[in-house]
Image (spheres, grey):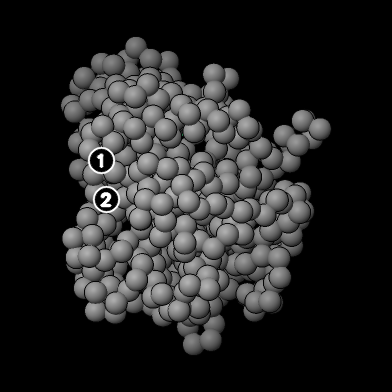
């Protein structure tokens, strides 16, 4: 098969890495990819949002399967377009991708289907939003549309909430993503990520994981795209797992179906595991980044037949097999990230890890100048290891991290610490 992966981050490197291992794969392309992905497969210099151009490419090159990494092309309707042209593509169509593209839509559908989530109200003008937050001690203010993960502010008082509303609705910090705001109740608990493959009817849960959104150790500092992830997440115990399936995923798919929407692809649920059980923070219409890296590292099964089964509505006929141990991904970032960051810094140590048997270094923001690797993005590398258990995977991953270096590089030293603590506390 000829397979095209769309996107340019660590998630897409992991997808390409896994897809290449499939005996069904003959040739893989990535559009636009990055320098690390370019070491593995042929790059196509088309951006993810150039959906017409991508469909022209897929038709011309007779691509058998296209896999969409990021959310933007999904919300632009890339899947609808490919399907219209008779091209096979993995991912939700435009209507289904609204689950990620509009927080107000996601909240509405959760309310209609009694899916556990934070209490909320939606506003299209700043004054009524401000009147609402005036009565709250704490709340979470969210831009309705896509804001690259930056449209959410956890507020501990009226002033902070008003400032967040002004940012989103008056200053339009996220453009028309801020035409509406959602104000939510603050949930307390531990966060987890849960991804599932679905064909709209059947659900194949993927291994659980946990992201680390804040930039500094101990969950301090501003939010980022994700500083590291590990799988499995012990907080998703069998009871929580059952609740996620029965109270969230099944009613969601049934609710979408009643609206005439078929969801095909990966459904990502961002969760707060509260004392009252799991509650939804957000839905994403794609693999999480960096969660995709450790989760795919643990997937023993061939990914390609799973993606095909999702497209063809046959997920009830496939099974997944997982490595028993754990996988941990540590994201190495450029100096300054998540603010304005440094570029073109020479990266040392990557050659040493070329034959690393127990892990892989996924590239997110690198470039090659002559024969030298340099940084080109905020999140630069996702160093990912597999181990017999979380403790071993953590030790392995940080041993590898120690070999990599560039000026200004920073990363979290406590990825997966929570899972280790749980293990100690739980015996
Ligand atoms: P979101 O993009 O909606 O997942 O929000 C980004 C981050 O904000 C989440 O990962 C949480 O850390 C935090 N967050 C969002 N909504 C809530 C909420 N209702 N209560 C507590 N924290 C939240
Ligand atoms: N790691 C969170 C996300 O992909 O949205």
Label 1 lies in ligand 1 vicinity (Cβ under 8 Å): no
In the foreground, 199 or 384: 199
Q: Residue at x 26, y 32 (%)?
A: 258
Q: Quadrant of the C terminus?
A: top right
Q: Kindly indicate whether the residue at mark 1 contacts the one at mark 2 (C-beta within 8 angstroms).
A: yes
> Which is more foreground, mark 2 or mark 1?
1
Residue plotted at (44% across, 50% down): 315
Secondary structure, mark 2, is loop
Check the image and name the residue furthest to the bottom: 370
At which x and y percent is residue 42? 41, 80
Q: Position of residue 105 (x, y in %)?
A: 27, 33
Ligand 2 within 8 Å of disc 2? The answer is no
Query: Is residue 216 in view from this perspective?
Result: no
Residue 160, horizontal then vertical, whole percent: 38, 26
Q: Which residue is mark 1?
A: 261
Q: Position of residue 7 (x, y in %)?
A: 38, 64
- Residue lying at the far front in this picture: please name it: 317
- Is 40 on the left or on the right of 183, as rendered? right
In this view, 196 is above or below 106: below
Q: Residues within 10 Å of mark 2 (few under 14, many from 20)?
A: many
Q: Is residue 33 above or below residue 197?
A: below
Which dot marks residue 93? 2
Element at label 1: loop
| Above or below for 339 versus 45 | above
Which residue is located at x 32 percent, y 39 percent?
99
- Per the rendering, the mark at residue 29 is none
Residue 331 position by quadrant: bottom right
On the rendered image, what quadrant is the N terminus found in? bottom left
State the separation of the CA atoms marked 2 and 1: 9 Å
Residue 154 found in image quarter: top left
């Amino acid at each position: 098969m000829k397979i095209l992966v769309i996107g340019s981050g660590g998630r897409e490197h992991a997808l390409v890495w896994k897809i290449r291992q499939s005996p069904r794969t003959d040739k893989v392309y990535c559009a636009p990819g990055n320098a690390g992905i370019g070491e593995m497969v042929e790059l196509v210099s088309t951006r993810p949002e150039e959906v017409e151009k991508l469909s022209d490419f897929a038709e011309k090159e007779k691509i058998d399967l296209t896999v969409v990494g990021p959310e933007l092309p999904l919300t632009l309707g890339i899947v609808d377009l490919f399907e219209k042209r008779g091209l096979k593509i993995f991912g939700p169509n435009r209507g289904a991708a609204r689950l990620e593209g509009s927080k107000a839509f996601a909240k509405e559908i959760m309310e209609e289907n009694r899916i556990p989530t934070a209490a909320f109200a939606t506003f299209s003008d700043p004054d009524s939003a401000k009147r609402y937050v005036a009565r709250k001690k704490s709340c979470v203010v969210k831009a309705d549309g896509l804001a690259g993960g930056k449209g959410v502010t956890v507020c501990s008082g009226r002033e902070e909430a008003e400032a967040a509303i002004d940012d989103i609705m008056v200053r339009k910090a996220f453009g028309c993503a801020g035409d509406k705001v959602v104000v939510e109740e603050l949930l307390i608990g531990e966060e987890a990520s849960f991804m599932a493959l679905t064909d709209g009817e059947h659900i194949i849960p993927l291994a659980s994981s946990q992201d680390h959104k804040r930039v500094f150790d101990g969950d301090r500092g501003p939010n980022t795209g994700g500083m590291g992830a590990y799988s499995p997440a012990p907080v998703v115990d069998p009871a929580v797992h059952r609740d996620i399936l029965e109270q969230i995923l099944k009613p969601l798919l049934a609710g979408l179906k009643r609206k005439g929407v078929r969801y095909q692809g990966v459904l990502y649920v961002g969760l707060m595991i509260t004392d009252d059980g799991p509650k939804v923070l957000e839905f994403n219409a794609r693999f999480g980044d960096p969660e995709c890296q450790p989760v795919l590292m643990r997937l023993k099964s061939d990914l390609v037949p799973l993606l095909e089964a999702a497209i063809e509505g046959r997920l009830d006929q496939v099974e997944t097999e997982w490595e028993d141990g754990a996988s941990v991904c540590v994201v190495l970032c450029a100096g300054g990230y998540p603010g304005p960051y440094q570029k073109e810094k020479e990266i040392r140590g990557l050659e040493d890890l070329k034959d690393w048997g127990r892990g892989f270094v996924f590239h997110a923001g690198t470039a090659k100048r002559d024969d030298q690797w340099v940084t080109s993005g905020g999140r630069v590398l996702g160093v990912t290891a597999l181990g017999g258990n979380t403790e071993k995977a953590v030790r392995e991953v940080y041993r590898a991290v120690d070999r990599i270096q560039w000026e200004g590089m920073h990363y979290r030293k406590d990825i997966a610490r929570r899972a280790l603590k749980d293990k100690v506390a739980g015996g």
